[in-house]
Image: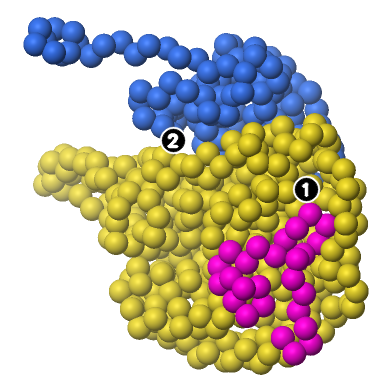
Protein backbone atom coordinates (compact mmCIF):
# COMPACT_ATOMS: atom_id res chain seq x y z
CA UNK A 1 0.00 0.00 0.00
CA UNK A 2 1.05 3.58 -0.49
CA UNK A 3 2.52 4.78 2.78
CA UNK A 4 4.06 7.97 4.05
CA UNK A 5 1.82 10.28 2.00
CA UNK A 6 1.44 13.99 2.75
CA UNK A 7 -1.23 16.13 1.05
CA UNK A 8 -0.04 19.47 -0.27
CA UNK A 9 -1.62 22.40 -2.08
CA UNK A 10 -0.06 24.44 -4.90
CA UNK A 11 0.75 27.14 -2.33
CA UNK A 12 2.57 24.84 0.10
CA UNK A 13 4.22 22.58 -2.50
CA UNK A 14 7.49 24.47 -3.04
CA UNK A 15 8.08 24.89 0.72
CA UNK A 16 7.49 21.21 1.46
CA UNK A 17 9.69 20.07 -1.42
CA UNK A 18 12.51 22.42 -0.41
CA UNK A 19 12.27 21.10 3.17
CA UNK A 20 12.40 17.54 1.85
CA UNK A 21 15.57 18.33 -0.09
CA UNK A 22 17.10 19.90 3.02
CA UNK A 23 16.29 16.71 4.97
CA UNK A 24 18.43 14.73 2.52
CA UNK A 25 15.81 13.07 0.34
CA UNK A 26 16.49 12.45 -3.34
CA UNK A 27 13.95 12.94 -6.09
CA UNK A 28 12.66 9.64 -7.46
CA UNK A 29 9.86 10.59 -9.84
CA UNK A 30 6.36 12.05 -10.21
CA UNK A 31 3.15 10.23 -11.06
CA UNK A 32 0.05 11.85 -12.50
CA UNK A 33 -3.36 10.23 -12.07
CA UNK A 34 -6.49 11.59 -13.72
CA UNK A 35 -9.31 11.73 -11.17
CA UNK A 36 -12.20 13.06 -13.25
CA UNK A 37 -12.91 15.34 -16.17
CA UNK A 38 -11.66 18.42 -14.35
CA UNK A 39 -9.08 17.29 -11.82
CA UNK A 40 -5.88 15.34 -11.70
CA UNK A 41 -3.56 14.28 -8.94
CA UNK A 42 0.21 14.61 -9.01
CA UNK A 43 2.17 12.40 -6.61
CA UNK A 44 5.79 13.35 -5.90
CA UNK A 45 8.05 10.48 -4.79
CA UNK A 46 11.25 10.99 -2.77
CA UNK A 47 13.62 8.51 -1.17
CA UNK A 48 16.03 8.52 1.77
CA UNK A 49 17.69 5.32 2.97
CA UNK A 50 15.22 3.18 0.98
CA UNK A 51 12.16 4.80 2.57
CA UNK A 52 9.78 6.58 0.24
CA UNK A 53 8.08 9.85 1.11
CA UNK A 54 5.21 10.94 -1.13
CA UNK A 55 3.40 14.24 -1.61
CA UNK A 56 -0.08 14.26 -3.10
CA UNK A 57 -1.24 17.36 -4.93
CA UNK A 58 -4.77 17.67 -6.31
CA UNK A 59 -4.97 20.16 -9.13
CA UNK A 60 -7.55 21.50 -11.57
CA UNK A 61 -6.57 20.47 -15.08
CA UNK A 62 -6.79 23.98 -16.41
CA UNK A 63 -4.74 25.57 -13.60
CA UNK A 64 -0.97 26.02 -13.61
CA UNK A 65 0.99 23.80 -11.21
CA UNK A 66 4.19 25.22 -9.72
CA UNK A 67 7.23 23.42 -11.10
CA UNK A 68 9.71 21.95 -8.62
CA UNK A 69 12.49 21.76 -11.22
CA UNK A 70 14.24 24.78 -9.68
CA UNK A 71 14.53 22.75 -6.44
CA UNK A 72 15.14 19.29 -7.92
CA UNK A 73 16.50 19.76 -11.43
CA UNK A 74 15.79 16.08 -12.17
CA UNK A 75 12.05 16.80 -12.02
CA UNK A 76 12.08 18.62 -15.35
CA UNK A 77 11.74 15.41 -17.39
CA UNK A 78 8.85 14.05 -15.29
CA UNK A 79 7.04 17.40 -15.46
CA UNK A 80 7.49 17.60 -19.21
CA UNK A 81 6.17 14.06 -19.55
CA UNK A 82 3.05 14.93 -17.54
CA UNK A 83 2.54 18.00 -19.72
CA UNK A 84 2.60 15.74 -22.78
CA UNK A 85 0.44 12.97 -21.40
CA UNK A 86 -2.15 14.88 -19.35
CA UNK A 87 -2.00 18.42 -20.75
CA UNK A 88 -1.33 19.87 -17.31
CA UNK A 89 0.83 22.99 -17.29
CA UNK A 90 3.83 23.42 -15.00
CA UNK A 91 4.80 27.01 -14.31
CA UNK A 92 8.50 27.82 -14.04
CA UNK A 93 9.87 24.67 -15.68
CA UNK A 94 13.62 25.13 -16.20
CA UNK A 95 13.56 23.32 -19.56
CA UNK A 96 10.06 23.47 -21.01
CA UNK A 97 9.53 21.32 -24.10
CA UNK A 98 6.02 22.79 -24.27
CA UNK A 99 4.31 19.41 -24.84
CA UNK A 100 6.84 18.26 -27.43
CA UNK A 101 8.96 15.94 -25.27
CA UNK A 102 7.45 12.92 -27.00
CA UNK A 103 5.12 14.41 -29.58
CA UNK A 104 5.19 16.72 -32.59
CA UNK A 105 4.34 20.40 -32.35
CA UNK A 106 0.89 19.79 -33.81
CA UNK A 107 -0.16 16.89 -31.52
CA UNK A 108 -3.31 17.91 -29.73
CA UNK A 109 -4.19 14.83 -27.72
CA UNK A 110 -3.45 13.97 -24.10
CA UNK A 111 -3.10 10.20 -24.48
CA UNK A 112 -3.34 9.18 -20.83
CA UNK A 113 -6.51 11.21 -20.19
CA UNK A 114 -9.62 9.05 -20.20
CA UNK A 115 -12.26 11.65 -19.62
CA UNK A 116 -11.37 14.45 -21.95
CA UNK A 117 -9.19 15.03 -24.91
CA UNK A 118 -8.78 18.67 -25.83
CA UNK A 119 -8.96 19.25 -29.53
CA UNK A 120 -7.77 22.71 -30.28
CA UNK A 121 -7.71 23.61 -33.91
CA UNK A 122 -4.25 24.66 -34.98
CA UNK A 123 -4.08 28.04 -36.71
CA UNK A 124 -3.58 27.76 -40.44
CA UNK A 125 0.00 28.51 -41.46
CA UNK A 126 0.22 31.97 -43.00
CA UNK A 127 1.73 30.71 -46.22
CA UNK A 128 -1.28 28.46 -46.89
CA UNK A 129 -3.82 31.11 -45.92
CA UNK A 130 -2.26 33.61 -48.28
CA UNK A 131 -1.74 31.34 -51.26
CA UNK A 132 -4.79 31.44 -53.49
CA UNK A 133 -4.01 28.31 -55.49
CA UNK A 134 -4.34 25.76 -52.62
CA UNK B 1 46.47 37.91 -28.71
CA UNK B 2 44.91 35.09 -26.67
CA UNK B 3 41.92 37.35 -25.99
CA UNK B 4 41.51 38.04 -29.67
CA UNK B 5 41.52 34.33 -30.45
CA UNK B 6 38.93 33.65 -27.75
CA UNK B 7 36.69 36.35 -29.14
CA UNK B 8 36.71 34.70 -32.55
CA UNK B 9 35.50 31.32 -31.15
CA UNK B 10 31.86 31.09 -31.98
CA UNK B 11 29.33 28.80 -30.33
CA UNK B 12 28.00 26.11 -32.64
CA UNK B 13 25.12 23.74 -31.98
CA UNK B 14 25.73 20.23 -33.25
CA UNK B 15 22.97 17.58 -33.41
CA UNK B 16 24.03 14.20 -31.98
CA UNK B 17 21.62 11.39 -32.84
CA UNK B 18 18.93 10.17 -33.02
CA UNK B 19 20.75 7.94 -35.51
CA UNK B 20 24.40 7.51 -34.65
CA UNK B 21 26.73 4.52 -35.14
CA UNK B 22 27.36 4.25 -31.40
CA UNK B 23 23.76 4.53 -30.27
CA UNK B 24 21.77 1.30 -30.14
CA UNK B 25 18.60 3.33 -29.63
CA UNK B 26 17.47 6.78 -30.72
CA UNK B 27 18.13 9.74 -28.47
CA UNK B 28 18.89 13.21 -29.75
CA UNK B 29 21.25 15.66 -28.06
CA UNK B 30 21.61 19.30 -29.04
CA UNK B 31 25.23 19.94 -28.16
CA UNK B 32 26.56 23.48 -28.05
CA UNK B 33 30.32 23.67 -28.49
CA UNK B 34 33.01 26.33 -28.49
CA UNK B 35 35.76 25.07 -30.75
CA UNK B 36 35.46 21.35 -29.82
CA UNK B 37 34.70 21.82 -26.14
CA UNK B 38 31.11 21.14 -25.05
CA UNK B 39 29.39 24.03 -23.32
CA UNK B 40 25.74 22.96 -23.13
CA UNK B 41 23.60 19.96 -23.89
CA UNK B 42 19.84 19.58 -24.24
CA UNK B 43 18.32 16.11 -24.74
CA UNK B 44 15.31 15.41 -26.96
CA UNK B 45 13.18 12.27 -26.87
CA UNK B 46 10.10 11.03 -28.67
CA UNK B 47 11.46 8.79 -31.43
CA UNK B 48 10.19 5.45 -30.10
CA UNK B 49 7.35 6.39 -27.77
CA UNK B 50 4.74 3.60 -27.67
CA UNK B 51 2.34 4.53 -24.88
CA UNK B 52 2.41 1.08 -23.26
CA UNK B 53 0.99 2.42 -19.97
CA UNK B 54 -2.23 3.19 -21.83
CA UNK B 55 -2.79 -0.51 -22.56
CA UNK B 56 -4.26 -0.96 -19.06
CA UNK B 57 -7.51 0.26 -20.65
CA UNK B 58 -7.82 -2.83 -22.85
CA UNK B 59 -5.61 -5.48 -21.18
CA UNK B 60 -6.46 -6.98 -17.80
CA UNK B 61 -3.98 -7.11 -14.93
CA UNK B 62 -2.80 -10.62 -15.87
CA UNK B 63 -2.30 -9.73 -19.53
CA UNK B 64 -0.32 -6.63 -18.54
CA UNK B 65 2.56 -8.92 -17.52
CA UNK B 66 3.18 -9.64 -21.20
CA UNK B 67 2.98 -5.90 -21.94
CA UNK B 68 5.47 -4.81 -19.28
CA UNK B 69 7.88 -7.53 -20.39
CA UNK B 70 8.02 -5.69 -23.68
CA UNK B 71 8.89 -2.30 -22.17
CA UNK B 72 12.49 -3.45 -22.58
CA UNK B 73 13.76 -6.74 -23.96
CA UNK B 74 17.09 -6.70 -22.15
CA UNK B 75 15.52 -6.52 -18.70
CA UNK B 76 12.07 -7.94 -19.51
CA UNK B 77 12.11 -10.43 -16.63
CA UNK B 78 12.86 -7.68 -14.10
CA UNK B 79 10.06 -5.45 -15.43
CA UNK B 80 7.62 -8.32 -15.01
CA UNK B 81 8.95 -9.13 -11.55
CA UNK B 82 8.49 -5.53 -10.38
CA UNK B 83 4.95 -5.49 -11.76
CA UNK B 84 3.87 -8.80 -10.20
CA UNK B 85 5.39 -7.76 -6.86
CA UNK B 86 2.99 -4.80 -6.91
CA UNK B 87 -0.06 -6.86 -7.84
CA UNK B 88 0.83 -9.49 -5.24
CA UNK B 89 1.14 -6.81 -2.58
CA UNK B 90 -2.24 -5.36 -3.50
CA UNK B 91 -3.88 -8.80 -3.44
CA UNK B 92 -1.97 -9.88 -0.32
CA UNK B 93 -0.58 -12.97 -2.03
CA UNK B 94 2.26 -14.83 -0.34
CA UNK B 95 4.55 -16.19 -3.03
CA UNK B 96 6.11 -19.64 -2.38
CA UNK B 97 9.77 -19.43 -1.25
CA UNK B 98 10.97 -21.54 -4.20
CA UNK B 99 9.43 -19.05 -6.63
CA UNK B 100 11.29 -16.20 -4.90
CA UNK B 101 14.61 -17.97 -5.46
CA UNK B 102 13.75 -18.78 -9.06
CA UNK B 103 12.99 -15.08 -9.61
CA UNK B 104 16.44 -14.21 -8.23
CA UNK B 105 18.14 -16.71 -10.55
CA UNK B 106 16.44 -15.49 -13.74
CA UNK B 107 16.74 -11.82 -12.81
CA UNK B 108 20.47 -12.17 -12.18
CA UNK B 109 20.88 -14.02 -15.48
CA UNK B 110 19.23 -11.00 -17.08
CA UNK B 111 21.60 -8.64 -15.28
CA UNK B 112 24.60 -10.62 -16.52
CA UNK B 113 23.51 -10.64 -20.15
CA UNK B 114 22.57 -6.96 -20.03
CA UNK B 115 25.96 -5.99 -18.58
CA UNK B 116 27.82 -8.23 -21.05
CA UNK B 117 25.89 -6.65 -23.89
CA UNK B 118 26.80 -3.19 -22.57
CA UNK B 119 30.47 -4.07 -22.02
CA UNK B 120 30.61 -5.13 -25.67
CA UNK B 121 28.89 -1.99 -26.90
CA UNK B 122 31.11 0.18 -24.71
CA UNK B 123 34.24 -1.44 -26.15
CA UNK B 124 32.80 -0.86 -29.62
CA UNK B 125 32.25 2.85 -28.80
CA UNK B 126 35.99 3.40 -28.53
CA UNK B 127 36.77 1.13 -31.45
CA UNK B 128 37.77 -2.07 -29.63
CA UNK B 129 35.77 -4.46 -31.78
CA UNK B 130 37.53 -7.66 -30.73
CA UNK B 131 36.53 -7.02 -27.08
CA UNK B 132 32.99 -6.31 -28.30
CA UNK B 133 32.90 -9.73 -29.97
CA UNK B 134 34.40 -11.50 -26.96
CA UNK B 135 31.81 -10.12 -24.53
CA UNK B 136 28.94 -10.94 -26.86
CA UNK B 137 30.33 -14.44 -27.29
CA UNK B 138 30.15 -14.92 -23.51
CA UNK B 139 26.64 -13.44 -23.46
CA UNK B 140 25.45 -16.19 -25.82
CA UNK B 141 25.96 -18.69 -23.01
CA UNK B 142 23.48 -16.82 -20.82
CA UNK B 143 20.97 -16.69 -23.66
CA UNK B 144 21.42 -20.44 -24.11
CA UNK B 145 20.60 -20.93 -20.42
CA UNK B 146 17.50 -18.76 -20.81
CA UNK B 147 16.42 -20.72 -23.86
CA UNK B 148 17.01 -24.11 -22.24
CA UNK B 149 15.18 -23.20 -19.03
CA UNK B 150 12.32 -21.05 -20.28
CA UNK B 151 11.99 -21.65 -24.01
CA UNK B 152 12.94 -18.07 -24.89
CA UNK B 153 16.29 -16.35 -25.21
CA UNK B 154 15.37 -12.77 -24.27
CA UNK B 155 11.77 -12.35 -23.16
CA UNK B 156 11.65 -15.31 -20.83
CA UNK B 157 8.07 -14.80 -19.59
CA UNK B 158 8.45 -16.71 -16.36
CA UNK B 159 6.58 -14.43 -13.97
CA UNK B 160 2.93 -14.83 -13.13
CA UNK B 161 0.90 -13.28 -10.36
CA UNK B 162 1.52 -15.63 -7.44
CA UNK B 163 4.89 -17.04 -8.47
CA UNK B 164 6.61 -18.30 -11.60
CA UNK B 165 5.44 -20.57 -14.41
CA UNK B 166 8.66 -22.60 -14.88
CA UNK B 167 10.77 -24.62 -12.49
CA UNK B 168 14.40 -25.71 -12.64
CA UNK B 169 15.32 -29.36 -12.25
CA UNK B 170 18.42 -30.50 -10.34
CA UNK B 171 20.11 -31.38 -13.64
CA UNK B 172 19.38 -27.95 -15.04
CA UNK B 173 20.79 -26.27 -11.95
CA UNK B 174 23.97 -28.35 -12.13
CA UNK B 175 24.34 -27.41 -15.80
CA UNK B 176 23.79 -23.72 -15.00
CA UNK B 177 26.54 -23.86 -12.36
CA UNK B 178 28.93 -25.46 -14.90
CA UNK B 179 28.10 -22.80 -17.46
CA UNK B 180 28.58 -20.04 -14.86
CA UNK B 181 32.07 -21.39 -14.09
CA UNK B 182 32.95 -21.03 -17.76
CA UNK B 183 31.33 -17.58 -18.00
CA UNK B 184 33.29 -16.41 -14.97
CA UNK B 185 36.54 -17.72 -16.38
CA UNK B 186 35.94 -16.18 -19.83
CA UNK B 187 34.95 -12.83 -18.29
CA UNK B 188 37.93 -12.57 -15.96
CA UNK B 189 40.23 -13.33 -18.91
CA UNK B 190 39.12 -10.02 -20.43
CA UNK B 191 39.69 -7.97 -17.26
CA UNK B 192 43.25 -6.92 -17.95
CA UNK B 193 42.43 -5.97 -21.54
CA UNK B 194 39.51 -3.85 -20.49
CA UNK B 195 41.07 -2.06 -17.55
CA UNK B 196 44.79 -1.96 -18.22
CA UNK B 197 44.94 -1.20 -21.92
CA UNK B 198 46.47 2.22 -22.61
CA UNK B 199 43.86 3.23 -25.21
CA UNK B 200 40.92 2.23 -23.03
CA UNK B 201 42.31 4.18 -20.07
CA UNK B 202 42.93 7.19 -22.30
CA UNK B 203 39.33 7.16 -23.53
CA UNK B 204 37.63 6.53 -20.18
CA UNK B 205 39.64 7.77 -17.18
CA UNK B 206 38.62 11.30 -16.16
CA UNK B 207 35.88 11.41 -18.81
CA UNK B 208 32.28 12.30 -17.94
CA UNK B 209 32.89 13.06 -14.29
CA UNK B 210 29.89 12.84 -11.98
CA UNK B 211 30.79 13.65 -8.37
CA UNK B 212 28.78 11.75 -5.77
CA UNK B 213 27.02 14.82 -4.36
CA UNK B 214 25.79 15.88 -7.79
CA UNK B 215 24.79 12.32 -8.60
CA UNK B 216 22.53 12.18 -5.53
CA UNK B 217 21.13 15.67 -6.18
CA UNK B 218 20.24 14.72 -9.74
CA UNK B 219 18.51 11.52 -8.60
CA UNK B 220 20.90 9.25 -10.52
CA UNK B 221 20.48 5.50 -10.04
CA UNK B 222 22.15 2.17 -10.66
CA UNK B 223 25.75 1.54 -11.75
CA UNK B 224 26.04 5.20 -12.80
CA UNK B 225 25.41 6.23 -9.17
CA UNK B 226 27.49 3.44 -7.66
CA UNK B 227 30.45 4.44 -9.86
CA UNK B 228 30.32 7.76 -8.00
CA UNK B 229 30.85 5.95 -4.71
CA UNK B 230 27.23 5.78 -3.49
CA UNK B 231 26.28 2.32 -2.21
CA UNK B 232 22.65 2.31 -3.26
CA UNK B 233 21.12 -0.78 -4.84
CA UNK B 234 17.43 -1.67 -4.64
CA UNK B 235 18.35 -5.30 -4.00
CA UNK B 236 19.18 -4.04 -0.51
CA UNK B 237 15.40 -3.78 -0.02
CA UNK B 238 15.44 -7.58 0.14
CA UNK B 239 12.71 -8.26 -2.42
CA UNK B 240 12.27 -11.81 -3.80
CA UNK B 241 14.91 -13.87 -1.97
CA UNK B 242 17.64 -11.21 -1.85
CA UNK B 243 17.21 -10.74 1.89
CA UNK B 244 18.42 -14.31 2.39
CA UNK B 245 21.52 -13.90 0.23
CA UNK B 246 24.88 -12.39 1.05
CA UNK B 247 25.00 -9.17 -0.91
CA UNK B 248 26.88 -5.85 -0.82
CA UNK B 249 26.51 -3.18 -3.55
CA UNK B 250 29.48 -2.81 -5.87
CA UNK B 251 30.93 0.70 -5.76
CA UNK B 252 33.83 2.57 -7.34
CA UNK B 253 35.08 6.04 -6.46
CA UNK B 254 36.52 7.39 -9.71
CA UNK B 255 33.18 8.93 -10.80
CA UNK B 256 34.15 8.61 -14.49
CA UNK B 257 33.47 6.35 -17.49
CA UNK B 258 36.17 3.94 -16.37
CA UNK B 259 34.47 3.53 -12.97
CA UNK B 260 31.07 2.91 -14.59
CA UNK B 261 32.63 0.21 -16.73
CA UNK B 262 34.36 -1.26 -13.70
CA UNK B 263 31.11 -1.38 -11.67
CA UNK B 264 29.27 -3.25 -14.42
CA UNK B 265 32.15 -5.65 -14.93
CA UNK B 266 32.25 -6.44 -11.19
CA UNK B 267 28.47 -6.79 -11.10
CA UNK B 268 28.69 -9.58 -13.68
CA UNK B 269 30.86 -11.52 -11.24
CA UNK B 270 28.60 -10.56 -8.33
CA UNK B 271 25.50 -11.84 -10.16
CA UNK B 272 27.28 -15.14 -10.83
CA UNK B 273 27.91 -15.38 -7.09
CA UNK B 274 24.28 -14.56 -6.28
CA UNK B 275 23.02 -17.28 -8.64
CA UNK B 276 25.38 -19.80 -7.01
CA UNK B 277 24.07 -18.78 -3.57
CA UNK B 278 20.45 -18.99 -4.75
CA UNK B 279 20.97 -22.45 -6.24
CA UNK B 280 22.65 -23.68 -3.06
CA UNK B 281 19.81 -22.39 -0.85
CA UNK B 282 16.74 -22.92 -3.03
CA UNK B 283 14.06 -24.77 -1.06
CA UNK B 284 11.80 -27.47 -2.48
CA UNK B 285 8.10 -26.80 -2.89
CA UNK B 286 5.47 -25.12 -5.03
CA UNK B 287 6.39 -22.51 -7.60
CA UNK B 288 3.13 -20.59 -7.63
CA UNK B 289 -0.16 -20.22 -5.80
CA UNK B 290 -3.65 -19.99 -7.18
CA UNK B 291 -4.84 -16.42 -7.54
CA UNK B 292 -8.40 -15.40 -6.76
CA UNK B 293 -9.93 -11.96 -6.84
CA UNK B 294 -8.77 -8.68 -8.28
CA UNK B 295 -6.34 -6.04 -7.07
CA UNK B 296 -7.53 -2.95 -5.26
CA UNK B 297 -5.60 0.03 -3.89
CA UNK B 298 -2.39 1.88 -4.59
CA UNK B 299 1.13 0.54 -4.40
CA UNK B 300 4.69 1.43 -5.33
CA UNK B 301 7.25 -1.30 -5.96
CA UNK B 302 10.93 -0.91 -6.68
CA UNK B 303 13.53 -3.37 -7.92
CA UNK B 304 17.07 -3.08 -9.27
CA UNK B 305 17.32 -3.36 -13.04
CA UNK B 306 20.74 -3.69 -14.72
CA UNK B 307 20.60 0.07 -15.29
CA UNK B 308 19.33 0.99 -11.84
CA UNK B 309 16.22 1.55 -9.78
CA UNK B 310 12.96 0.64 -11.51
CA UNK B 311 9.73 1.93 -10.00
CA UNK B 312 6.16 0.85 -10.69
CA UNK B 313 3.17 2.77 -9.37
CA UNK B 314 -0.03 0.74 -9.63
CA UNK B 315 -3.54 1.96 -8.83
CA UNK B 316 -6.35 -0.59 -9.00
CA UNK B 317 -10.06 -0.27 -8.34
CA UNK B 318 -11.09 -3.92 -7.94
CA UNK B 319 -11.94 -4.43 -11.62
CA UNK B 320 -9.93 -6.53 -14.04
CA UNK B 321 -8.36 -3.42 -15.59
CA UNK B 322 -6.00 -1.22 -13.62
CA UNK B 323 -6.76 2.44 -12.99
CA UNK B 324 -3.21 3.64 -13.56
CA UNK B 325 0.16 2.11 -14.23
CA UNK B 326 3.21 4.35 -14.08
CA UNK B 327 6.65 3.03 -14.94
CA UNK B 328 9.76 5.05 -14.02
CA UNK B 329 12.73 3.42 -15.67
CA UNK B 330 16.39 3.98 -14.68
CA UNK B 331 17.41 5.70 -17.90
CA UNK B 332 14.65 8.27 -17.34
CA UNK B 333 16.38 9.07 -14.03
CA UNK B 334 19.88 9.01 -15.52
CA UNK B 335 19.40 11.38 -18.46
CA UNK B 336 19.95 14.51 -16.27
CA UNK B 337 23.45 13.15 -15.51
CA UNK B 338 24.46 14.19 -19.02
CA UNK B 339 24.07 17.86 -18.00
CA UNK B 340 26.97 17.37 -15.59
CA UNK B 341 29.03 14.80 -17.47
CA UNK B 342 29.25 16.45 -20.90
CA UNK B 343 30.08 20.16 -20.41
CA UNK B 344 33.83 20.73 -20.53
CA UNK B 345 34.48 17.50 -22.44
CA UNK B 346 35.71 17.16 -26.03
CA UNK B 347 33.13 16.54 -28.72
CA UNK B 348 34.91 13.26 -29.54
CA UNK B 349 34.15 12.00 -26.00
CA UNK B 350 30.38 12.26 -26.43
CA UNK B 351 29.75 8.68 -27.66
CA UNK B 352 31.74 7.12 -24.81
CA UNK B 353 30.15 9.34 -22.14
CA UNK B 354 26.59 8.91 -23.40
CA UNK B 355 27.04 5.15 -23.55
CA UNK B 356 28.51 5.11 -20.04
CA UNK B 357 25.04 5.65 -18.52
CA UNK B 358 23.84 2.60 -20.52
CA UNK B 359 20.90 4.49 -22.06
CA UNK B 360 17.82 2.43 -22.84
CA UNK B 361 15.45 4.66 -24.76
CA UNK B 362 12.96 1.85 -25.28
CA UNK B 363 12.55 1.77 -21.49
CA UNK B 364 12.58 5.53 -21.13
CA UNK B 365 9.81 6.25 -23.61
CA UNK B 366 7.79 3.10 -23.01
Q: Where residue B86 is drawn, which disc sits there?
A: 1
Where in the figure is residue A11, as x and y percent of width and height? Answer: 68, 14
**Residue A102 - label:** 2
> Which secondary structure lies at badge 1?
helix
Please provide percent x and percent y for residue B234.
Answer: 72, 58
- Chain coloured blue here: A
Horizontally, residue B278 falls left or right of residue B308, namely: right
Could you tell me which residue is drawn at 63 percent across and 53 percent down?
Answer: B66
Q: Nearer the viewer, residue A111 or B321?
A: B321
Instruction: Give the camera-side residue of B162 and A124.
Output: B162
Q: Chain of mark 1?
A: B
Instruction: Report the number of discs.
Output: 2
List x then y, in percent, for residue B148: 63, 80
Colour scheme employed for the rendering of this structure: by chain
The chain to which mark 2 is attached is A
Report the residue at 41% width, 32% height from top: A103
Chain B: its colour in the image is: yellow
The vertical placement of B249 against B92, above or below, is below
Q: Identify the residue at image location x=85%, y=80%.
A: B281
Q: Which residues are magenta?
A: B147-172
Quadrant of residue B275 within the rendered picture: bottom right
Label 1 and label 2: CA atoms lie apart by 27 Å
Secondary structure of the residue carrying tag 2 is loop
- Quick one: label 2, few (<14), some, or many (20+) residues within 10 Å? many
Residue A25, numbered circle: none
Amino acid sequence: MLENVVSVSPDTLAGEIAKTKYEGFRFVTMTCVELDADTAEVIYHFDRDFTLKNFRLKAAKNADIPSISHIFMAAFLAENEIQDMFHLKFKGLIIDFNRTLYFDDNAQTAPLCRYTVSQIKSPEPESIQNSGDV
Amino acid sequence: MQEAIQKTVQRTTIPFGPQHPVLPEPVHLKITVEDEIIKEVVPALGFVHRGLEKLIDIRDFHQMIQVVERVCGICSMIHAMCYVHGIEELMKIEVPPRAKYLRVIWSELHRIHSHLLWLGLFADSFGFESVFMQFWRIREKILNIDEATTGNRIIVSVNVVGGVRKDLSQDQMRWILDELDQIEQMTTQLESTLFEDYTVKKRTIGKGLLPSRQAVELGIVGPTLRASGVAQDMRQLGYAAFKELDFEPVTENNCDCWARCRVRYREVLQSIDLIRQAISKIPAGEINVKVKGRPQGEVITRVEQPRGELLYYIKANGSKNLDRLRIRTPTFANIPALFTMLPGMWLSDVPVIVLSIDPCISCTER
